Image (tube, rainbow, N blue to C red):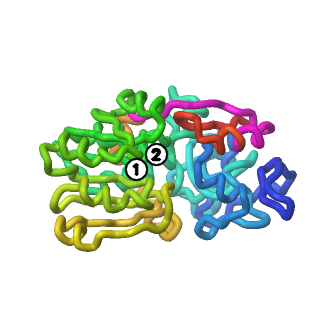
Amino acid sequence: MKAFVYGANGAALTEIDKPKPTGAQVLVRVRTCGMNRADLGMIAGHVHGTAGGVGTVLGMEFAGEVVELGPDAKDVKVGDRVMGSGGGAYAEYALTDHGRLLPIPKSMRFEDAATLTLALTTMHNAVVTVGGLHPGQSILVQGASAGVGLMAMQIAKYKGAKLVIGSSTDAAKRAKLSEHGADLAIDSHNETWVDEVLKATGGKGVDLIIDQVSGKLVNQNLAATKVLGRIVNVGRLGGTHGDFDFDLHAARRISYVGVTFRTRSIEEIRDIFGLVKADLWPAVESGQLKLPIARVFPFADIADAVTFMSANRHFGKIVLTL
């Protein structure tokens, strides 16, 4: 089968053997793949958790049809249309655990399904499970114009947030955030953004920040969060290190939590997927929770898709079709 593999001379389309499911694994005939920012690092040869390096089949998100089951796989059958996550997504066939699959609604295209799995699971966990958002509360999503950020705002609205604020440093992208749940869009490069958030919240600050930027924003985030508020660190696009005002953190009694799938057990991941189906599925089936597609590339043109994504000028998800 054809797969996009990181080899000794970099990432390239390569012919490899089709994998065989074992245990609780499921083999999926991939029809579409969703591209994610973390893929760029692995395409450059970096390690992402336990994935990456020479011999790695790249990609983390796909949609397709189940073609074979391992002996312990449950709740799925051959022929099912599914979307899922797991390593090796950029290939004609992908393996994943049975608990990392979601059913594709009957009316949904494979292209749209490929955009949803990581955004839904990452942000339901961050906003609802870890972030503890309740109806009537306020939320700020830093890095809101990325696919996962757009989904975070939509989930917040769906769960009854009274005020949703999204940030983007790109004016054109910022102008589109209101179409995806934002009541207020801010520029985190603007020195006055904390004042904007405080004004919008009556001087108190937001109940919850979903932070995908981190770096030098950390102390401004603390200042924009209310006393007894929460910050969930999801991404570090602005840097993995920065000055931290421990006194401000203590004074505002903020709960600051980091999340990642990289260190979660398969049991934890299965639980996250189960909660998404239990809590969000009516909104997924109705199309209330969806992501815009910036561009669709044929799998053979994956090098062009990588270049397009690296430019970071797109809004929404990039999809590959096989």
Tell me which residue sits at (20%, 49%) in the image. Answer: 134
Q: Which residue is mark 1?
A: 123
For residue 130, say whether it is visible.
no
Query: Which numbered tag is attached to residue 148?
Result: 2
Which residue occupies the foreground of this view, 244 or 273? 244
Q: Residues within 10 Å of mark 1 (few under 14, many from 20)?
A: many
Residue range corresponding to the magenta coloring: 287-306
Which residue occupies the foreground of this view, 167 or 79? 167
Quadrant showing the C terminus: top right
Percent coordinates x, y for residue 37 in the rendering? 58, 50
Query: Which numbered tag is attached to residue 191?
Result: none
**Residue 161 is inside the magenta segment:** no
Measure how far apart labels 1 and 2 are at the Cα level. Answer: 7 Å
245 w.r.t. 276: above or below: below
Tell me which residue sits at (34%, 39%) in the image. Answer: 186
Q: Say which label, 1 or 2, has the lower sequence index.
A: 1
Which residue occupies the foreground of this view, 224 or 163? 224
Tell me the kind of residue under disc 2: Val
49 w.r.t. 119: above or below: below
293 w.r.t. 161: above or below: above
Relative placement, left or right, of 275 versus 84 is left
Q: Secondary structure at mark 1?
A: helix
Tell me the kind of residue under disc 1: Met
